[in-house]
Amino acid sequence: MSNSGNKVAVVTGATGGIGFEVAKRLGKDGYTVVLNGIEDEAGAKRIEELTALGIKAEYYGFDVTKDEEVTENITKIGEKYGRIDVLVNNAGGIGVRARFEEMTTDQYRFVMALNLDSVFFASRAAIPFLKKGENASIINYTSNAAWNGAGPGAGIYSVSKGGVQSITRALAKDLAEYGIRVNAVSPGTIDTPFHAQIKATKPEVFASWANSVLLGRLGQPEEVAGVVSFLASDDASFMTAETVQIGGGQALGI
């Protein structure tokens, strides 16, 4: 892509899985990458790995569901570097599996906080520094669940990702006047530690997932990272309010 010079990328939830591959790819693209997570030991290891690859990287431990922690840390990052060029709101997950009837209010609020509040908190805090960035952008993560209602027990995950779909478009409208672009990726089933338990305990179920994908296999984290890299780059400078499917055609069904 283009030479990123002294550009700064912040990636939340980046101590493993897709988030780490995204941080690694942006680092290879020339960004200084700031990883966020809640597992400080894993964070330290990841920084060592990136540094060994010649990537400038730093770790900030904070909980993306806590507005004060997010604001304080994103502000520190922005003030340290004088800018933020890319914010990747990668943190998120199923959070809780529960049917609506049994779901507690706390469970509901936790999943919404993990997937939707986190995007709002981090974006709000980063905007003043994105304004100082070059071809600045925010990249969010939605899911097929945003429109298909998700599987049993993941209903609130679906609701939260529907919110991410909407906030992506709303932020794109809100920030267009500053030249800040906002897009989303929608990964399909990606082969990450996220699925490790089912892979180990029910390999036949895990293997069957590939049958619902047009390309006949699961995705790799690097394949998501490549699309995030593109969306952050000058090649995507006229793209905003878009959602890019990275699912091997899974969304079409077979």
Image (cartoon, rainbow, N blue to C red):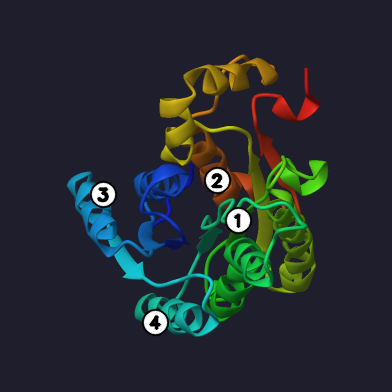
Q: Residue 202: tell me if it is visible.
A: yes
Residue under the image location 50 percent in, 64 percent down: 85
Q: Residue at x 61, y 14 (%)?
A: 216
Task: Tell which of 128 and 120 is nearer to you.
Answer: 120
Which residue is under mark 3? 50
Q: Which circle's residue, 2 or 3, is located before the other in the chain?
A: 3
Residue 143 lies left or right of residue 25; in this view the side is right
The dot on residue 228 is: 2
Mark found first going from the N terminus, 4 or 1: 4
Q: CA distance from mark 4 to mark 1?
A: 20 Å
Identify which residue is drawn at 27% across, 55% down: 42
Q: Are marks 2 and 3 in contact (CB under 8 Å)?
A: no
Label 4, on which residue?
Answer: 76
Mark 2–mark 1 CB contact (< 8 Å): yes
Q: Position of residue 236 (x, y in %)?
A: 64, 47
Which amino acid type is shown beneath numbered disc 2?
Val
Q: Earlier in the sequence, mark 1 or mark 3?
A: 3
Which residue corresponds to mark 1? 139
Tag 2's secondary structure? helix
Q: Earlier in the sequence, mark 2 or mark 1?
A: 1
Name the residue type under label 4.
Lys
Q: Categorize mark 2 by other alpha carbons within 10 Å: few (<14), some (14-19), many (20+).
A: many
- Lateral position of residue 1 relative to residue 111, left or right: left
Q: Amino acid at mark 3?
A: Leu
Nearest the viewer among 196 and 35 is 196
Q: Are marks 1 and 3 in contact (CB under 8 Å)?
A: no
- Residue 222: image location, x then y, percent: 45, 34
Helix, strand or loop at mark 3: helix
In space, the residues marked 2 and 3 are separated at their CA atoms by 18 Å
